[in-house]
Image: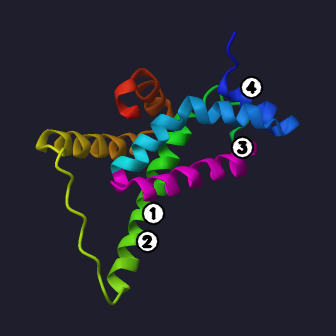
Amino acid sequence: MQETDGQLLEEFLTHQNEEAFAEMIRRHGAMVMGVCHRVLRNSHDAEEAFQAVFVLLSQKATSLRGRQTVGGWLHNTAWYCARNLKSKLATRSRHEIHLEESPMPSADTTTLSVVQNDLKEFLDRELSSLPEKYRLPLIHGSGSLSS
């Protein structure tokens, strides 16, 4: 029987079990990375936000005790971390003397994929505004938001 997120979190907190934390990353990493990438649209920035989300999980784990799943919390945190990083990057960009040109979209980027990415970012924003009791079933019931 697979352990719940709550059991893994408890194992991490009480025994500093790094494997339990790694399992949380395996379970939810794709969803977190998907949210970060859709908001930031840059792999390096998305990786930075992804790492921030799981650092926050390790720091806030005690306050999440008793939850059966942390997927909703991770989705919301990923969205906020990515939005905050995007804002900081925009501010930094405005203050730089020499702005670099925006990277050109790769040849394989199609209009459809851009539209799909915009739609997914919109859905992430809307999901983050829902109370967790409504957000959780949508996140866990939809594999399409994980990429």
What's the residue type where badge 4 is placed?
Gln
Q: Nearer the viewer, residue 56 or 45?
A: 45
Tell whether 83 sits left or right of 25: left
Give the residue pinned by disc 1: 84
What is the number of the mark on residue 7? 4
Give the residue pinned by disc 2: 88
For marks 4 and 3 on the same chain, the one whose residue lies earlier in the sequence: 4
Element assignment for label 3: helix
Quarter of the rendering occupied by the C terminus: top left
Tell whether 33 sits left or right of 96: right
For marks 3 and 1 on the same chain, the one whose residue lies earlier in the sequence: 3
What's the residue type where badge 2 is placed?
Lys
Pinpoint residue 65: horizontal percent, then vertical percent.
73, 36
Q: CA distance from mark 2 to mark 4?
A: 35 Å
Q: CA distance from mark 1 to mark 4?
A: 30 Å
Whether tag 1 and tag 2 are in contact, CB under 8 A, the answer is yes
Whether tag 2 and tag 4 are in contact, CB under 8 A, the answer is no
State which region is magenta: 39-62
Question: Considering only vertical position in the picture, is 70 above or below 68?
Answer: below
Residue beneath the point at 81% across and 39% down: 13
What is the number of the mark on residue 47? none
Q: CA distance from mark 1 to mark 2?
A: 6 Å
What's the residue type where badge 1 is placed?
Asn
Task: Residue 52: say if magenta.
Answer: yes
